């Protein structure tokens, strides 16, 4: 249920109503804009008579919310959320460019890539330390050592870092990680989502291989329900019958998500296509579609990469692409 308060409401009146609603056992989510205050009511709203609430002098309107996701809904939070971390921002007209290798392999590699992508305009450095691989015999990442090398690259370049978490038991290792990524395979790892909801970390939540947009938002709701609304959604392609690409990039997710949620949306064309030749066109298309950020895999030697070299751009290729992305974004915002 949502209650929209009148512009003339005083702080005392608003606080009195909020305290009364909380006294009914409801969680009250407050969203304040320049011309409105929206109270989102979460819990057993059957205790509240909507007609009674509507009759209050300070209440302009009362609406019910049919969607199962509440705090992630734009109805609860009409304005875009702007997620800012380490100098990078996503949403509300801001744009973040995330770049780096699929996997951290050694100090020289991650430092070189970090310096080069920053020079090209990247605002966040990505790098995998814990790698979920389809085969148990593939490279699984440097784990804790990889996170240490990422932190070193952060100190050298000043770029905030994002890395994927695999297990809630690893959470204490992510103290220096600015954005914790929840990968596609863990999108519905609800115990992990609950724990991340208790942190104050920014969470990059990737859509699962075969999950709907509604299911993505329900996973985001798990994090929101814990009190953490610092969430960036990521469309990284879904599994269809098509085999020409690794996955099928659902660019329509950008306008759909912008309509129904206030959370920023990032596109990952690298994992979506699986081929470096297709990444530039899809990245540019994502910028034109209005994505709040783009995440691209960049490796200094893709041919010899230990993980996903086929979908990685070289720093030189990324530099060319970054210029196109920023140019298209300027046109899209005009």
Image (spheres, rainbow, N blue to C red):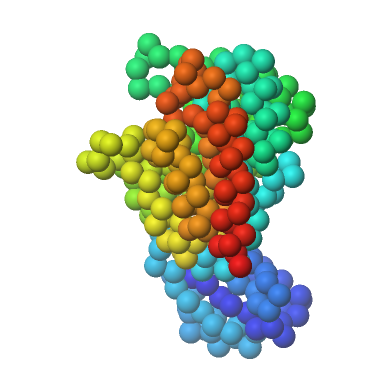
| Image: 99 above or below 87 | above
Asked which quadrant contains residue 134, the reply is: top left
The image shows residue 211 at horizontal and vertical percentages of: 34, 45
Instruction: Tell which of 49 and 154 is nearer to you.
Output: 154
Residue 89 at least partly seen = yes
Q: Residue furthest top?
A: 137
Which residue is at 33% across, 44% downward? 248
Q: Quadrant of the C terminus?
A: bottom right
Identify the residue at image location x=72%, y=85%: 8
Residue at the image position 74 percent from the left and 44 percent from the top: 87
| Residue 113: x %, y % from top left | 64, 26
Q: Nearer the viewer, residue 63 or 56?
A: 63
Residue 283 coordinates in the image, percent (x, y): 49, 46
Q: Position of residue 63 (x, y in %)?
A: 48, 77
Q: Is residue 329 above or below residue 30?
A: above
- Residue 221 visible? The answer is no
Classify residue 64 by image quadrant. bottom left
Q: How many marks?
A: 0
Q: Is residue 125 above or below residue 301?
A: below
Q: Nearer the viewer, residue 72 or 307?
A: 307
Identify the image quadrant of residue 107. Answer: top right
**In-image side of 179 versus 259 (left or right):** right
Query: Foreground residue, 57 or 131?
Result: 131
Residue drawn 47% across and 65% down? 259
């Amino acid at each position: 249920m949502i209650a929209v308060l009148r512009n003339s409401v005083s702080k005392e009146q608003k606080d009195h109503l909020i305290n009364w609603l909380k006294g009914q056992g409801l969680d009250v989510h407050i969203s304040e804009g320049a011309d409105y205050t929206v109270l989102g009511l979460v819990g057993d709203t059957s205790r509240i008579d909507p007609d009674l609430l509507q009759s209050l002098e300070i209440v302009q309107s009362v609406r019910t919310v049919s969607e199962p996701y509440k705090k992630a809904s734009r109805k609860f939070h009409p304005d875009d959320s702007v997620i800012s971390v380490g100098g990078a921002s996503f949403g509300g007209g801001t744009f973040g460019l995330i770049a780096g290798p699929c996997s951290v392999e050694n100090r020289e590699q991650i430092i070189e890539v970090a310096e080069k992508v920053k020079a090209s305009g990247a605002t966040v450095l990505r790098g995998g330390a814990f790698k979920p691989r389809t085969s148990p015999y593939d490279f699984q990442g440097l784990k804790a050592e990889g996170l240490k090398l990422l932190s070193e690259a952060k100190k050298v370049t000043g770029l905030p870092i994002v890395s994927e978490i695999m297990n809630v038991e690893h959470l204490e290792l992510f103290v220096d990680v600015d954005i914790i990524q929840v990968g596609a395979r863990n999108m519905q790892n609800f115990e992990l989502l609950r724990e991340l909801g208790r942190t104050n970390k920014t969470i990059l939540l990737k859509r699962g291989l075969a999950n709907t947009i509604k299911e993505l938002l329900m996973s985001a709701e798990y994090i929101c329900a814990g009190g953490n609304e610092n969430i960036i959604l990521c469309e990284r392609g879904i599994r269809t019958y098509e085999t020409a690409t690794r996955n099928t990039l659902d660019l329509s997710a950008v306008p759909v998500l912008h309509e129904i949620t206030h959370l920023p949306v990032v596109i990952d064309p690298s994992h979506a296509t699986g081929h470096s030749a297709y990444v530039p066109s899809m990245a540019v298309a994502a910028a034109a579609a209005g994505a709040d950020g783009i995440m691209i895999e960049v490796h200094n030697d893709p041919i010899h990469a230990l993980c996903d070299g086929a979908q990685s751009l070289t720093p030189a290729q990324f530099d060319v692409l970054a210029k196109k992305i920023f140019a298209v974004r300027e046109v899209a915002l005009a």
